[in-house]
Image: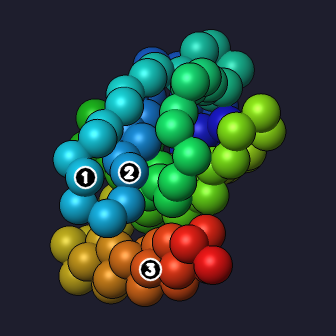
Amino acid sequence: VVVDSSGQPVDGARVVIEMAGGTGRKFETKTNKKGEYIQIGLPTGSYAVMAEKDKSGSAPTTVGVRANTTQTANLALAGASASAVKEAQAKNAAISKVFDEAVQL
């Protein structure tokens, strides 16, 4: 679910799901009137999930996807600063690296 800063669902927000590890695989979907979104058929791996609408965006959230399971990533839109977004991306990259190493083990 994608919500705004007041906790209300966001209709028509663009949700970007990008596979970690520099593969360049990216998936996009949009939210419905309830702020809900879904993306099926993702290959196993770690993904950064972000949402945006108008000039507001969410901080990226890292989600680990495995076959035949459902994962949830709730996102909140806010006018995030560029430095805050870069910091969140760096943290998510570190988390993704650890996740990928764990999957390989």
Rounded to the nearest whole Å, what is the CA distance between mark 1 and mark 2?
7 Å
* Label 1: few (<14), some (14–19) or many (≥20) C-alpha neighbours in 10 Å: few
Q: Secondary structure at mark 3?
A: helix
Seen at 59% across and 15% down, the residue is: 32
Between 73 and 104, the one nearer to me in the picture: 104
Q: Earlier in the sequence, mark 3 or mark 2?
A: 2
What amino acid is at disc 3? Lys
Q: Position of residue 93 (x, y in %)?
A: 38, 77
**Label 2, residues with CA under 10 Å away: few <14, some 14-19, many ≥20:** many
Q: CA distance from mark 3 to mark 1?
A: 13 Å
Cβ–Cβ below 8 Å for labels 1 and 2? yes
Residue corresponding to mark 3: 97
Identify which residue, 44 or 80, lies in the foreground: 44
| Residue linked to disc 1 | 23
Report the disc number at residue 81. Answer: none
The quarter of the displayed image where residue 70 is located = top right
**Which element type, helix, strand or loop, lies under badge 1?**
loop
Three-letter code, disc 2: Met
Q: Quadrant of residue 104?
A: bottom right
Q: Amino acid at mark 1?
A: Thr
85 versus 58 height, above or below: below
Whether 82 is drawn above or below 65: the answer is below
Residue 22 appears in the picture as rendered: yes
For image coordinates 23% across by 61% down, the residue present is 22
Residue hosting label 2: 19
- Distance from disc 3 to disc 2, alpha carbons, whole Å, reads 12 Å
Upstream in sequence: badge 3 or badge 1: 1
Element class at badge 2 = strand
Q: Is residue 30 above or below residue 6?
A: above
Q: Residue at x 43, y 23 (%)?
A: 29
Relative to 67, 2 lies left or right: left
